[in-house]
Amino acid sequence: MQSQVTLITLYKMKKKGEKIVALTAYDYPFGKIVDESGIHMILVGDSLGMVVQGESSTLPVTMDQMIYHTRIVSKAAKFAIIVGDMPFMSYQASIKQAVVNAGRFLKEAGAAAVKLEGGAGVSETIQAISGAGIPVQAHIGLTPQSVHKMGGYKVQRNEEQLMADALEVESAGAFSVVLEGIPSTISKKITKALTIPTIGIGAGPHCDGQILVLYDLLGLNQGHIPKFVKQYATIGDASRNAIKQYIEEVQAGKFPAKKHCY
């Protein structure tokens, strides 16, 4: 049986050049499936606002909602390291509030670490949370909580700023950094410059690891599919077909059949 993934595991993987594989999860059944598949890291992302709650952005997601979803995923995971995503306004108002909210993910939800968005501007917050004994994963590049400030979901190309942000969050104590929506040439330079692992999403193949939204990977989401997403299954279509067949069989009197009766 594989031993549980820890921060030390991730550091060793980077040093050896072994790719870290991460996915999001939001509930117990999928958390169990993802964990049993051998994923190294599960992010309980505030992306649940869009893929589970039907919101147009991640901004409405609350701390209590994140604690709830992180707790049920944590119950399912025996191997992967669980990272709880700090939602909008859970860490921006004050450093004290940020530390308290980060602590809730470990104390109430069973996570091993938290993730927050931002570069140099949140370095003091990362330092304070890390100083409280709470591992922090940083997130730079395209940061969805800043969608209005960025003018939409746009690829970030300012290499000087991105490199400065990456080095700053590492210096502040982040154990890892998510690189989102960044050209692969820049991600390659950042990954080489850092001693902590980089986890890419829409940032090319040179990062130390990759993460995708589970529902994107499984083909559960409809509408616009980002360029960086690969659908490994079409569970949405399979589910619709199964439900249509169920409806037809009930209406035709084919279900329940004799074998389904007591």
Image (spheres, helix red, strand yellow):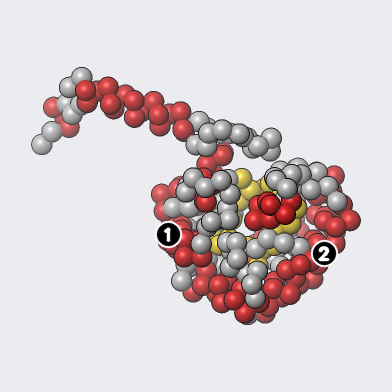
Decide: is 161 above or below 210: below
Question: Hey, which residue is sitting farthest right in the picture?
Answer: 160
Element at label 2: helix
* Residue 19 visible (yes or no): no
Specify the quadrant of the image occupied by residue 99: bottom right
Instruction: Out of 135 and 126, give the one closest to the viewer.
Output: 126
Q: Position of residue 176 (x, y in %)?
A: 70, 62
Tag shown at residue 72: 1
For the residue marked with disc 2, what is the amino acid? Leu
Q: Earlier in the sequence, mark 1 or mark 2?
A: 1
Instruction: Out of 128 and 9, give the one closest to the viewer.
Output: 128
Question: Hey, which residue is sitting farthest top in the picture?
Answer: 252
Task: Calculate the distance from the C-alpha at mark 1 to the C-alpha at mark 2.
Answer: 34 Å
Residue under the image location 65 percent in, 56 percent down: 145
Q: Position of residue 51 (x, y in %)?
A: 51, 45
Tag shown at residue 167: 2
